[in-house]
Amino acid sequence: KIAPAPRHFLDLTDFSSSELRTVLDACADLKRRRRKGEPPAERPLAGKFLAMVFDKPSTRTRVSFDVAMRELGGETLMLTGREMQIGRGETVADTARVLSRYIDAIMIRILDHGMMLELAEYATVPVINGLTKDSHPCQIMADVLTFEEHRGSIKGRTVAWSGDANNVLASWAHAAARFDFTLNVACPPEMPVPESLIARAKAEGATLNITADPFEAVAGADCVVTDCWVSMGDEDEAHRHNLLMPYQVNGRLMAAAAKDAVFMHCLPAHRGEEVTAEVIDGPQSVVFDEAENRLHAQKGILAWCLGAVP
Ligand code: CP
Ligand code: NVA
């Protein structure tokens, strides 16, 4: 008998629109239950173990996955690359095979996207992408949930990104293809959106408009998003600051968006760099709802990966 393929959560483009909508509905439902103080139906992940492998720092992803798993009745193990034999040369494939014998799912944060894919190839349990250099799909599930809670369906709306064309932008582009919204991107011509990202998003059907002018990108947008100028792994590229300064989300830039536009940022934020305090701490900012929604999003994702959502 052939075992069914594990339900990995690696990138949004691996799913159909309706599959993603099913997962997002599960996230929203689990959030409603928590708000009402109702326990999730019979603790659906009781007896299940999630290994959380972190090769890079994290606050939100680490804590939200940990709490999500426990609230659904499961248990977690926290592992860091340095403490594992993988840090001394054990192969990713062998690590995947061994972990699969002990635990029920693996969430991994590792810069090398290829290593995450290799882990998924050899694991016989679901692997969840907790951020790589190429993408951050769990974040964007929380972001879509947040946008829709504040402004209704994201379908047909416009999201504008101003700043570094990084992993978070990549997952926004994947989401644009699946949730059917327009994504406008403004970034410095010296640090262009990678061709591979554009090609993939467009092949998946995303409406993606790229410009060097942040005011053109945000004009009339329903949501303005940015992220740090220096992502994990980019620490030695200090010249980024000068190139990215014109893309800072400040009051003047926000004023060019739709009147009721929301401001989003995956956090951690750097006030005075990619965003001013006036914007991130201002009335249009939904960044802490967004951070909270990581918890609810992780629950829906875990429940789906572990078969508790059909
Ligand atoms: N947004 C996000 O992934 O935050 P952490 O790096 O704190 O997990
Ligand atoms: N783009 C950032 C996101 C952090 C959550 C990074 O990769 O460091």
Image (spheres, rainbow, N blue to C red):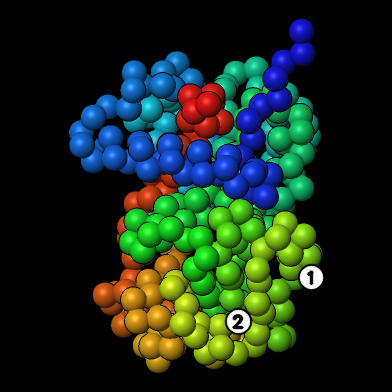
Where residue 287 appears, x then y in whole percent? 36, 64
Q: Circle 2 sits on which residue?
A: 186
- Tell me residue 131's x, y (percent): 59, 51
Q: Which residue is drawn at 77% across and 39% down?
A: 118
> In this rendering, would 290 be left or right of 95?
left
Please tell me which residue lies in front, 35 or 74: 35
Residue 293 in sight in this render: yes
Q: In this view, does 218 lie to the left or right of 294?
A: right
Quarter holding residue 40? top left
Q: Residue flagged by tag 1: what amino acid is it?
A: Glu
Query: In the rendered image of this protein, does residue 32 appear above or below residue 261?
Result: above
Look at the image and tell me whether residue 109 can be seen: no
Task: Name which residue type carries label 2.
Answer: Ala
| Residue at the image point whose x is 51% and y is 44% from the top | 21
Q: Find the residue positioned furthest to the left.
A: 37
Task: Give whichever of discs 2 and 1 has the lower sequence position.
Answer: 2
Q: Residue at x 77, y 60 (%)?
A: 203
Q: Which part of the image, by quadrant, shows the N terminus?
A: top right
Inter-mark Cα distance, 2 to 1? 15 Å
Give the numbered dot on residue 30: none
Image: 282 above or below 234: below
Residue corresponding to mark 1: 195
For label 2, count other residues whose C-alpha is less than 10 Å away and answer few (under 14), some (14-19) or many (20+).
many
> Please, what secondary structure does the residue beneath circle 1 have?
helix
Q: In this view, does 82 lie to the left or right of 138?
A: right
As drawn, which residue projects farthest toward the top? 1
Q: Are marks 2 and 1 in contact (CB under 8 Å)?
A: no
Label 1 crowd (10 A; few <14 / some 14-19 / many >=20): few
Image point 44% across, 63% down: which residue?
267
Image quarter of residue 73: top left
Element marked by disc 2: strand
Distance from mark 1 CB to nearest ligand 2 atom below 8 Å: no
